[in-house]
Image: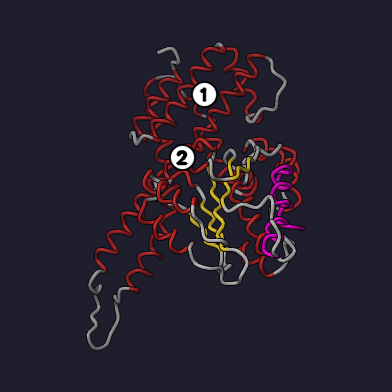
């Protein structure tokens, strides 16, 4: 299998990238390299595989056979150890100008192995305005063999001046059947479970994999989808909001705890804590306290981001649920992401109008916008659950 064979349901994008990789090889060989450019923007809905497509393209640029999938170059890209690949994963709420300037300096170096130097910037839409302006200058005047691969949900999430200088690769939501096939063939998931996970994840490949393989992930989804039925009064709305936010906090803490501890330990060791010998002491040497404070600030930002992402995933499950309610109300013959809760869908469809359902969907989307604007999660989610209970208020 080649590196592009792992891109589920992205045949058109894969064909474009194959041609560009061939053009890149031609350019290195002294040809014109028509079809290869130094800046790319990968866009698509969550779970469509933006980062996977960018990584596959990177492997194809490094690989002598343009992405065979089994050579050392392809393997190094897959595990992230290739010396000419710089992967940027913003873990906090944003990616600042200082980090971007350091990144640009690293990207300016010549390739170690002589082909390309690739910067794969995941979630590039998190770059601040200052960082985006610095990035624009780097993209406008890149070194001859540096390639920038930016990933964002949509072109509109990037500065117009940046996206105008990038070649756009648009990924689509993979079909349910394609995702289910991947789960069944690569993860040995039973067909019924694979179909359920693919349908519930709405084409989000990583989410489908978690639902298929992790019973706790399925339990969390079940808890979220039980919210509409539980909203029988204002008190129940407040309690439902508290449960949702508390679950997000617990999951974010679990995700970041181990990583935080290892980062702090490594930093303390780097600054000499516990060292012995002449001129050394068992505390942090000069500069260590400031570095530790900066690390703790970044970890807090990462924890906040993780919490928001967990809540947002729950909100998207609720949007899918009410979209399915709307489909039932109109008698539309479409695939339902919440088919496993068909009784709840039918009951709510009978007890409300399509206008009520649309107002409920609007309330969820408004909650997402408020969370993105740093509104207190508890307040934003409480307002949403009350609107779900009484959509016309």
Instruction: List x then y, in percent, for residue 93.
Output: 39, 46
Q: Are marks 2 and 1 in contact (CB under 8 Å)?
A: no
Question: Where does residue 149 sit, x and y in percent of width and height?
Answer: 56, 52
Give the class, few, some or many, for how many residues have Cα within 10 Å of label 2's Cα (few <14, many ≥20): some
Is 362 located above or below residue 32 in the figure?
Answer: above
Residue stretch rendered in magenta on the structure: 1-29
As helix, strand or loop, the secondary structure at mark 1 comes to helix
Q: CA distance from mark 2 to mark 1?
A: 42 Å
Above or below residue 97? Residue 266 is below
In which quarter of the view is residue 167 placed? top right
Quarter holding the N terminus?
bottom right
Q: Residue at x 68, y 50 (%)?
A: 35
Residue at 44%, 31% in the rendered image? 368
Q: Nearer the viewer, residue 98 or 289?
A: 98
Provide the residue designation for mark 2: 159
Instruction: Name the residue at the bottom extreme.
Output: 278
Q: Is residue 12 magenta?
A: yes
Membership of 159 in magenta stretch? no
Secondary structure beneath label 2: loop
Rendered image quadrant of residue 341 = top right
Q: Give percent across and percent down for residue 253.
A: 41, 51
Instruction: Answer above or below: position of 24 versus 12.
Output: below
Q: Main secondary structure of the magenta part?
A: helix
Residue for badge 1: 229
132 displayed left or right of 220:
left
Quadrant in the picture for residue 266: bottom left
Quarter of the image with the C terminus in it: top left
């Amino acid at each position: 299998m080649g590196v592009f064979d792992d891109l589920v349901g992205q045949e058109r994008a894969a064909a474009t990238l194959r041609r560009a990789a061939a053009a890149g090889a031609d350019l290195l060989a002294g040809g014109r390299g028509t079809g290869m450019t130094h800046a790319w923007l990968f866009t698509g809905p969550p779970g469509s595989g933006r980062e996977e497509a960018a990584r596959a393209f990177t492997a194809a640029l490094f690989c002598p056979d343009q992405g065979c999938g089994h050579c050392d170059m392809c393997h190094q890209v897959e595990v992230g150890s290739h010396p000419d690949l710089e992967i940027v994963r913003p873990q906090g709420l944003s990616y600042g100008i200082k980090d971007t300037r350091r990144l640009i300096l690293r990207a300016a170096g010549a390739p170690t192995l002589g082909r390309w130097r690739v910067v794969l910037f995941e979630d590039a839409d998190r770059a601040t305005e200052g960082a985006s302006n610095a990035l624009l200058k780097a993209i406008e005047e890149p070194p001859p063999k540096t390639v920038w691969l930016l990933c964002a949900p949509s072109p509109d999430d990037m500065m117009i001046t940046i996206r105008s200088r990038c070649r756009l690769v648009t990924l689509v939501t993979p079909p349910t059947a394609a995702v289910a096939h991947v789960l069944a063939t690569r993860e040995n998931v039973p067909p019924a479970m694979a179909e359920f996970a693919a349908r519930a994840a709405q084409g989000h490949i990583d989410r489908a994999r978690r639902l298929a393989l992790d019973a706790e992930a399925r339990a969390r989804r079940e808890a979220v989808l039980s919210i509409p039925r539980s909203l029988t009064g204002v008190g129940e709305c407040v309690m439902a909001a508290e449960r949702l936010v508390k679950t997000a906090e617990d999951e974010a803490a679990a995700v970041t705890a181990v990583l935080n501890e290892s980062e702090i330990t490594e930093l303390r060791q780097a600054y000499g804590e516990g060292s012995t010998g002449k001129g050394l002491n068992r505390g942090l040497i000069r500069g260590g306290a400031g570095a530790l404070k900066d690390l703790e600030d970044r970890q807090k930002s990462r924890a906040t981001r993780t919490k928001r992402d967990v809540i947002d995933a729950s909100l998207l499950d609720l949007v899918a649920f009410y979209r399915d309610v709307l489909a039932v109300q109109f008698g539309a013959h479409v695939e339902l992401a919440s088919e496993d809760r068909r009784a709840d869908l039918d009951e709510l469809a009978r007890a409300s109008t399509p206008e009520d359902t649309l107002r409920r969907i609007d309330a969820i989307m408004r909650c997402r916008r408020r969370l993105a604007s740093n509104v207190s999660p508890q307040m934003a989610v409480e307002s949403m659950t009350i609107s779900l209970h009484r959509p016309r208020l």
